[in-house]
Image (cartoon, helix red, strand yellow):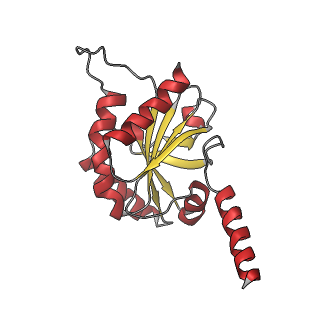
Amino acid sequence: MKKLITLTSVFLLFALTTFAQKGKPFPTMEAETLTDKAITLPSAGKGKVTLIGVSYSKKSQDNLETWMQPIYDTFINPPKSDLFGSVSYDVNMYFVALARGIAKTAEKSIKGSMKKKIDKKLQPNIAIVMGEVKQHKKNLGLGDKADPYFYILSPEGKILHITYGKYSPSKMSAIESAVDEYMD
């Protein structure tokens, strides 16, 4: 029994140290945007703070959609002015869908379907990573398929903040605080 507890503890410690963690570099991912541009993350965001949203299942769609408008309103198209002097952020932003290794024809079908549903202004910010889903899940510490995951990266590609799940004002506030803290 003691061996089992020790072995379990060692495994958990190893597992926790291999996942993406605050202060560690974001793992490299090769992706293609909906505008057919090949990108490598996190280097595509180098030079600016970068927000990367990741999902790997259709089950996360509903929760991911709860983030779209708040992220758009905060980071892409903030109000020009308001009574409180709203902050304008100069950040890179990508939403990344991890897709299992599928045939190129299926990839085109997925992209075509996504292009029809997603505003053209957002398409350069939406990327698909094909294959290696298990490895990316492990590297990023992804858990529940129903959760989208959000990573705030420094201009050098180090993780400043991680959150996941359905949108909430407190989660958005924590993201904004991480961006503000780094940009100050």
Q: Quadrant of residue 7?
A: bottom right
Estimate the x, y position of residue 52 in percent, counting from the top left.
47, 42
Is residue 118 depicted above or below 44 in this figure? below
- Identify which residue, 114 or 164, lies in the foreground: 164
Asked if residue 69 shows in the view, the reply is: yes
As drawn, which residue projects farthest toward the bottom? Answer: 1
Q: Residue at the location (31% across, 34% down)?
A: 72
Q: How many marks?
A: 0
Q: Residue at the location (36% across, 40% down)?
A: 170
- Identify which residue, 36 or 61, lies in the foreground: 61
Whether residue 153 sits left or right of residue 148 in the image: it is right
Q: Quadrant of residue 147?
A: bottom left
- Identify which residue, 13 or 2, lies in the foreground: 2
Is residue 26 depicted above or below 61 in this figure? above
Whether residue 95 sits left or right of residue 62 in the image: it is right
- Identify which residue, 58 or 36, lies in the foreground: 58
Estimate the x, y position of residue 32 in percent, counting from the top left.
48, 47
Whether residue 27 sits left or right of residue 126 in the image: it is right
Estimate the x, y position of residue 49 in percent, counting from the top left.
52, 29
Asked if residue 123 shows in the view, the reply is: no
Q: For the N terminus, which image quadrant?
A: bottom right
Whether residue 115 sits left or right of residue 124 in the image: it is left
Estimate the x, y position of residue 161 in percent, counting from the top left.
53, 40
